[in-house]
Amino acid sequence: MCGIVGYIGVKEATPVLLKGLKKLEYRGYDSAGIAVLGAGGLEVCKSKGALNKLEEKVSALSAQASQTGGASKKPFGGTLGIGHTRWATHGEPSDINSHPHTDISGKIAVVHNGIIENHRKLKEWLAGRGVVFRSETDTEVIAHLINYYYAGELLVAVQAALKRLEGSYALGIICENDRDHIIAVRKESPLVIGRGGGENLIASDVPALLEYTRDVYYLDDREIAVLSKDKVEFYNEEGERVQKTLSHVDWDAGAAEKGGYEHFMLKEINEQPKALTDTLRPRIIPAGGTGAMASSRSVNLAEIGFDKSWAEARRVVLCACGTAWHAAMVGKYAFEYFARIPSDAEIASEYRYRNPIFNPSDIFIIISQSGETADTLAALRLAKKNGGRVIAITNVLGSTLAREADLVMYTWAGPEIAVASTKAFTTQLMCVYLIALQFGLLRGNLDQAGLDHYIEALEKIPTQAEAVLKSKETIQRFASLCFNKSKVFFIGRLFDYAVSLESALKLKEISYTHSEAFAAGELKHGPIALADESTLVTALCTQEALFDKMDSNIKEVKARGASTVVITYDDVHHFDESADTVFRIPRTPDCFTPMLSVIPCQLYAYYCSVLRGNDPDKPRNLAKSVTVE
Ligand code: AGP
């Protein structure tokens, strides 16, 4: 979604803003712009398309001015400014619709992430007061409203304007008459404040701040921050001062860089062994002591308050969107498998509009890489309102999900920049497996020996993931032979079906191939009508008890001309006859295979994307974090 940056300090703001916007490119955008308070007043430059177009436009304007004017008039030379990458919602991508938007006086500039739901009503109201609108955006009303209420105090005008806004927003606001402040506001769209020495910043996400500071404040909903170069003050919506705690971001700046890889996605696929280790290791307590003092190994889930009271739970509801929903599906099977407890995997964007049945003893597990997905947050709020115990699994410290859930389990995957989620998915799986195992022990469905066996298997997963990654050249070669297939299906049952869904999503989102996943048993109920010579069918076959069933399905599509790929264990030859190609993964208990079998599919999607000439990190029409409905 849109990206916001803002800078106030002693440096020239323009390079800081442009660099910051670069760091937010991963969020997805179609146009960009900056507004800087320079010697000549408020200067705005906006451009449809990639950031380099904006950079070129800014340099051209600067060059023009240096030929005609003196250095004191250097355009975009001020030390206070805001910038924005726009992902069009209201109005097509164009220079005019790009942010920042200014008011009629041209003195107030606003950047916005979110949607102003009552913008039509406000537009009519403002038009009735003589305002002529220049863009088709919902954002422009904000600049005009602030101007309407402005009587010399920017903060007062912003507070008055906010009272009129309905919807979601993160805002950065500057005003030519107030050269000492940036005002930042947040309601349901993320915004972080970076606290530097003699300079302060705002950004939609931490990577844009890391070059300048690792000390951040996470704005809460309906809070306002007033930044000057030496301090930041916070206010609640009643206008009262609020004290906030400074958080320190531990990741080094390199974590959000490509580190020699051609794309973030490839880097993140390769980081999975480490991410899995980092997610698993701190939660395993090794066996210790001897004799009467001996203790068995166990899973430490103190962070989510896992204790005997969980035994009262009658149902687990896992809720998420996209890839995280696929992790929820694996979670559902894992809870049934290990804990024999009824479990549901809900699509958050559906769940929030249903009239779901709540039980006070239900446990809600809400999963989100970003912790900012609007639909997922709405599902969380619904569950909380109905008294559910809400546990968040998220990758982003200080995210809205982390702050609003009762308790949080972090996936220690490190920053995930590529739009296509990879390491977040496998670490989400690691988290749900750990909870399901511990739940199994508590409910008596698993004994200590069983737990030991599964923990041992989990501990091998990072090394096994490493082994799967070693086969990347085989997958690259395979992709080079069939990257232009027009129809790609993934089939599987249970755990393998969840991976099929994830694999089809990965392929469609970055390679734009029409790919679908089917529960293998459903083929005969319709989808097999699509199978012909142009079809590639990838069958996920990692559950021993279902090998024969899967083999029949593979033969059925093959008989209709489809090419077939099978993903199975490295010691299985069950599919040698039916499969045209086999990708192999190391042995692990069948229920854990999703953490390994998804890797060849991620790599396949990545290579198809590159071979089709796409940028896998920035797929068309998609944003990393969907902060609006
Ligand atoms: C993943 O590849 C997708 N880009 C998308 O489905 C994503 O998983 C979904 O939008 C949910 O995001 P979240 O995990 O940040 O909530």
Image (cartoon, grey):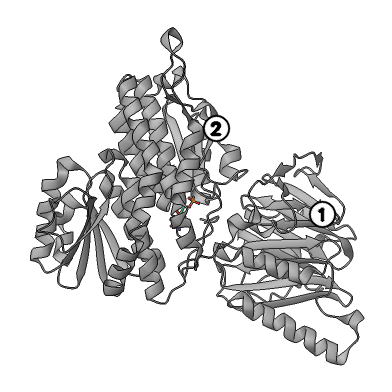
Dot 1 corresponds to which residue?
227
- Disc 1 marks a residue whose amino acid type is Leu
Q: CA distance from mark 2 to mark 1?
A: 31 Å
> Which residue of the protein is positioned furthest toward the left in this rendering?
559
Residue for point 79% across, 71% down: 36
Quadrant in the picture for the N terminus: bottom right
Image quadrant where residue 236 sits? top right
- Mark 2 lies on a secondary structure that is strand
The residue closer to the viewer here, 68 or 99, is: 68
Image quadrant where residue 125 sits? bottom right
Q: Is residue 381 left or right of residue 333?
A: right
User: Counting residues from the N terminus, which is met first, the one under dot 2 or under dot 1?
Assistant: 1
Q: Is residue 284 above or below residue 223?
A: above
- Disc 2 marks a residue whose amino acid type is Leu
Residue 335 percent coordinates (x, y)? 34, 32
The answer to whether residue 57 is seen in the rendering is yes
Tags 2 and 1 in contact by the CB under 8 Å rule?
Answer: no
Residue for point 21% across, 62% down: 537
The residue closer to the viewer here, 624 or 207, is: 207
Image quadrant where residue 471 sits? bottom left
Residue 328 percent coordinates (x, y)? 38, 43
Residue for point 14% across, 51% down: 573
- Mark 1 lies on a secondary structure that is strand
Dot 2 corresponds to which residue?
407
The label shown at residue 383 is none
> Which residue of the protein is positioned furthest toward the bottom in this rendering?
67
Residue 345 percent coordinates (x, y)? 36, 41
Q: Is residue 42 above or below residue 159?
A: below
- Around disc 1, counting alpha carbons within 10 Å, would you say few (fewer than 14), some (14 to 19), or many (20 or more)? many
